[in-house]
């Protein structure tokens, strides 16, 4: 396909083989608890599937029952590699994974580019994993949908909130915020930090910092949106890599949380 972003973390963060990838995601979803609440606004982690997949699956179970009605996904994650101001959209027509192509909603992108904080930058997307890692999960859960992928650089909570406001009233649009929690602390310390961060997320605090969540910029925007629209946060799962595939590496773990805003 012309003008498509190719996967850059297939074979590292998740399997490059389509059958193995799909089978693994199905296993994560089957192991997750059934959804207890409906929501079109999720927060989910973005590490390698063997580490964060079980936690992310808890969020995605929320969309399984309503999958036929979600036809577009606004996906917002932090920039790990490129420094810039605002939020960046790609110019491509599709994003590719081993499970196939996901078309970009160019009309939605055009609307977003009218906002002063939104720019177009393929460089911001080229090596970014915080969005790509979610795409196979979305393909498995939703089937066909269009994507509006946004990488967040330096942006305020209000600027992110304004982006979400454009689409939330559309009942066929789901919004996914991508973040991990604490990074590289001993197991018990990570649990303490992530429990405190989770409490702050539930309290709709909009001043989270990078040490609490690498995606604090999009998360703060989502929590600002929640405050303005009377939403509350439900925590679905909080664990770390020492609970999943890193059980033998508990001296240096990464935290993951799954939340719904409803």
Image: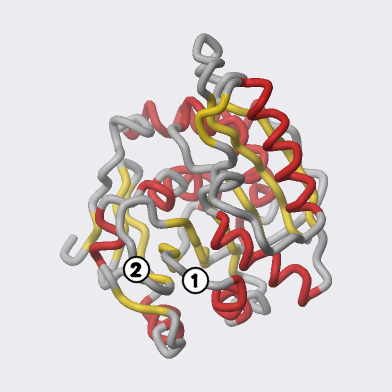
Image-quadrant location for residue 70: bottom right
Question: In the rendered structure, which disc, 1 or 2, sits on the residue that comes first in sequence?
Answer: 2
Looking at the rendered structure, the number of numbered marks drawn on it comes to: 2
| Disc 1, SS | loop
Q: Position of residue 140 (x, y in %)?
A: 49, 44
User: What residue does disc 1 label?
Assistant: 155
Q: Position of residue 221 (x, y in %)?
A: 62, 68
**Which residue sits at x=78%, y=55%?**
233
**Which residue sits at x=74%, y=68%?**
226
Colouring used for the render: secondary structure
**Which residue sits at x=79%, y=52%?**
202
Is 170 on the left or on the right of 14, as rendered? right
Q: Is residue 89 above or below residue 81?
A: below
Q: Position of residue 258 (x, y in %)?
A: 66, 43
Q: Decide: few, some or many residues near mark 2? Use Cα within 10 Å; few <14, some 14-19, many ≥20.
A: some
Q: Say if residue 149 shows up in the picture.
A: no
Is 176 on the left or on the right of 122, as rendered? right
| Disc 2, SS | loop
**Which residue sits at x=65%, y=51%?**
63
Quarter of the image with the C terminus is: bottom right
Q: Nearer the viewer, residue 43 or 250?
A: 250
User: What residue does disc 2 label?
Assistant: 84
Q: Say if residue 256 shows up in the picture.
A: yes
Q: Nearer the viewer, residue 143 or 121?
A: 121
Is 72 on the left or on the right of 262, as rendered? left
Query: Which label number is shown at residue 15?
Result: none
Q: Position of residue 37 (x, y in %)?
A: 81, 51
Residue farthest bottom in this picture: 114
Q: Decide: few, some or many residues near mark 1? Use Cα within 10 Å; few <14, some 14-19, many ≥20.
A: some
């Amino acid at each position: 396909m012309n003008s498509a972003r190719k996967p850059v973390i297939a074979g590292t963060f998740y399997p490059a083989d389509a059958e193995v990838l799909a089978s693994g995601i199905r296993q994560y979803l089957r192991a997750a608890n059934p959804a207890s609440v409906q929501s079109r606004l999720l927060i989910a982690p973005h590490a390698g599937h063997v580490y964060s997949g079980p936690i992310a699956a808890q969020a995605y179970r929320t969309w399984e029952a309503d999958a036929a009605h979600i036809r577009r996904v606004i996906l917002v994650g932090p920039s790990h590699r490129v420094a810039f101001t605002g939020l960046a959209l790609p110019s491509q027509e599709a994003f590719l994974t081993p499970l196939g192509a996901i078309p970009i909603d160019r009309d939605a992108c055009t609307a977003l580019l009218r906002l002063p904080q939104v720019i177009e930058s393929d460089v911001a997307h080229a090596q970014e994993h915080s969005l790509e890692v979610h795409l196979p999960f979305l393909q498995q859960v939703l089937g066909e949908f269009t994507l509006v992928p946004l990488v967040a650089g330096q942006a305020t909570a209000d600027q992110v909130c304004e982006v979400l406001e454009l689409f939330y009233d559309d009942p066929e649009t789901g919004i996914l915020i991508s973040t991990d929690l604490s990074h590289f602390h001993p197991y018990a310390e990570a649990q303490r930090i992530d429990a405190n961060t989770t409490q702050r997320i539930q309290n709709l605090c909009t001043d989270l910092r990078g040490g609490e969540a690498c995606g604090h910029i999009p998360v703060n925007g989502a929590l600002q949106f929640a405050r303005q629209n009377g939403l509350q946060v439900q925590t679905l799962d909080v664990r770390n890599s020492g609970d999943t595939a890193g059980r033998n590496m508990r001296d240096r773990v990464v935290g993951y949380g799954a939340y719904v805003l409803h």
